[in-house]
Image (tube, grey):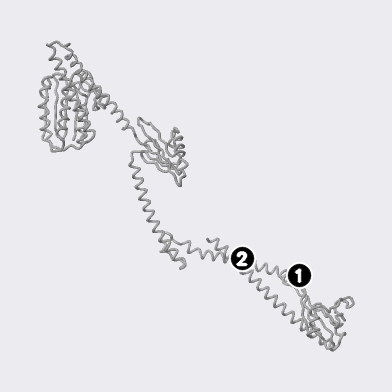
Amino acid sequence: MKRRIFRSSLLITMLVLLCCLGILIGFVYDYYDDVQVRQLKDELGIAAAGMEQDGLKFLKDVRSERFRLTWIRADGTVIYDTIADENTMANHAEREEVISAFATGSGSAKRYSDTLTERTLYEAIRLNDGTVLRISMRQATVTALLRYMLLPIVLVIALCVVLSLILSKKMSRRITEPLDRLNLEAPLENEAYPEIEPLLQRLNVLHLQIDAQMQKLKQKTAQFEQSIGNMSEGLLLLDQDGQILTVNPAALRIFRADADCVGKNILAIDRDGLFRNAINETFLNGHCQMQFEREGKNYHIGFDRITDDEQPAGAVILAIDMTQQKLAEYSRREFSANVSHELKTPLQSIIGSAELLKDGFVKQEDIPTFLERIHKEASRLVVLIEDIIRLSQLDEKQPIPTQTVALDSLAQEVVSILRESAEKKKIRLTIHTEPTEMIGVPRLLSELLTNLCDNAIKYTNAGGSVEVEIKNKAIIVRDNGIGIAPEHHMRIFERFYRVDKSHSRRSGGTGLGLSIVKHAAEYHNASVTLESALGQGTSITVQF
């Protein structure tokens, strides 16, 4: 702005200077021309008076380098000329000033030279004897005058240019200095030109609007960052050149990248080139997806194109951890296979025994044995189905009415029911309780206690002991049985998982007891802790 003001003021100054010079020269030249014409008339009057007294003798006595006198007869022939030979001169009857002098008594004329740098002034007067006396003088034109005055004009222009440069620079500085000091953060607090007050007020309004919009933008950005920061899915935003615009912590963790990857190409985190073809396909077709495995986890990655006015503007990449879904799918398949197997085994035994009885291949005295087998397998089948139904209900997390439960009394009841089976195996079953009340589902808590105690009795050898303890809102069941090797600890609560399948078959277990314990504990927001070593017994704690 300062430079533009400087140039404009300098240009205006030069234009004014040139206009003034042109006008001044015009006035000077007009004044100079008027003075010369009057002087020429005065000289002609003096010469005419001299001619009236002395005649030709007067003309011959005239000596002048500036003026030229010519005496002309009525027919236009030249009688005498102070400069040229009258015998060689042409007839002057057609000259403008001569015609006017013969007709009116006086005449004037101006004629330019061929170069237009000089002109001649003519004044003529009629004498008493009817002849005409003409006087002429050469005069420089404006062009010649400018040529003669070129050096002074150049010096004046140069001086004016220097002064204009200095003054324009100072003026532009003085004009822009208040503008340079403007505080645009607080427009209304400035002391500036009154002419820009409306502008400052408008700037203040715009400033307030921008502040409000920036505040909203910051809030939106914070909300967006908080949202993507809390996502378990990995999120990446790319521009049309494949540069990373946004990446959330989950994506950094999944792709093992650093936060400084923002602003870099996607290749900064896609070291194996897995995404290259997928991104190209996304920009071409709008969508792509792929499976990705890293560190034992399975991810589903979706690529979607972002468009602006139907032109590709970037892409969004969403990585979803499918590990739990795949594990759940595997567990469902395994559960279905195990259920089929567990149901088929007692059914085959029942069907086989029934066919033998039906076909009469069983002796009369063996019939009770086969009937006992059918009853035993049918009972086992019923228990298995009930356990499966119970687990399904727990999986679906269907709401079950709760009430205040005296956990110590419930444990006493369970132990009294199982004491007979413990005594048959010559196992000492003891219980230590303290008054404990909690909000829960009595049926689930009873099944939890029953399964823990029943398991402990089943996997404890004759002469062993099982101890049940209720304290600090915790159920602790200890035994000194066969124990569980460490490699089985992680899977012992899975459905149908058995450490010793042959022992489980003999004891009539379904393989669902500890799984029911786990789900019942989770339903009550309790934790289950297992401590066991092979040959050293087992301790399971359920902490509510």
Tell me if residue 322 comes above or below residue 230 in the rendering: above
Q: Secondary structure at mark 1?
A: loop
Question: Extreme right residue here?
Answer: 87
The disc placed on residue 523 is none
Tell me if residue 237 comes above or below residue 216 in the rendering: above
Q: Is residue 257 visible in the rendered structure shown here?
A: yes
The residue carrying pointer 2 sits among few (fewer than 14), some (14 to 19) or many (20 or more) residues within 10 Å by Cα, namely few
Residue type at numbered disc 2 = Val
Q: Position of residue 168 (x, y in %)?
A: 57, 65
Q: Which residue is mark 2?
A: 162
Q: Residue at x 13, y 14 (%)?
A: 367
The residue carrying pointer 1 sits among few (fewer than 14), some (14 to 19) or many (20 or more) residues within 10 Å by Cα, namely few
Q: Which label sits in the foreground, 1 or 2?
A: 1
Point out the tag, 1 or 2, that comes first from the N-terminus. Answer: 1
Compute the Cα span from label 1 to label 2: 34 Å
Q: Nearer the viewer, residue 397 or 487?
A: 397
Question: Extreme front residue here?
Answer: 359
Q: Secondary structure at mark 2?
A: helix
The disc placed on residue 116 is 1
**How many numbered discs, if any?**
2
Q: Is residue 267 visible in the rendered structure shown here?
A: no
Q: Position of residue 468 (x, y in %)?
A: 14, 28
Seen in the image, is 497 located left or right of residue 91? Answer: left
Seen in the image, is 162 located left or right of residue 151? Answer: left
Q: Position of residue 229 (x, y in %)?
A: 34, 42
Q: Nearer the viewer, residue 513 or 143?
A: 513
Seen in the image, is 198 located left or right of residue 537? Answer: right
Q: Quadrant of residue 444?
A: top left
Q: Position of residue 260 (x, y in %)?
A: 42, 41
Q: Quadrant of residue 152?
A: bottom right
Residue type at numbered disc 1 = Leu
Tell me if residue 483 comes above or below residue 292 in the rendering: above
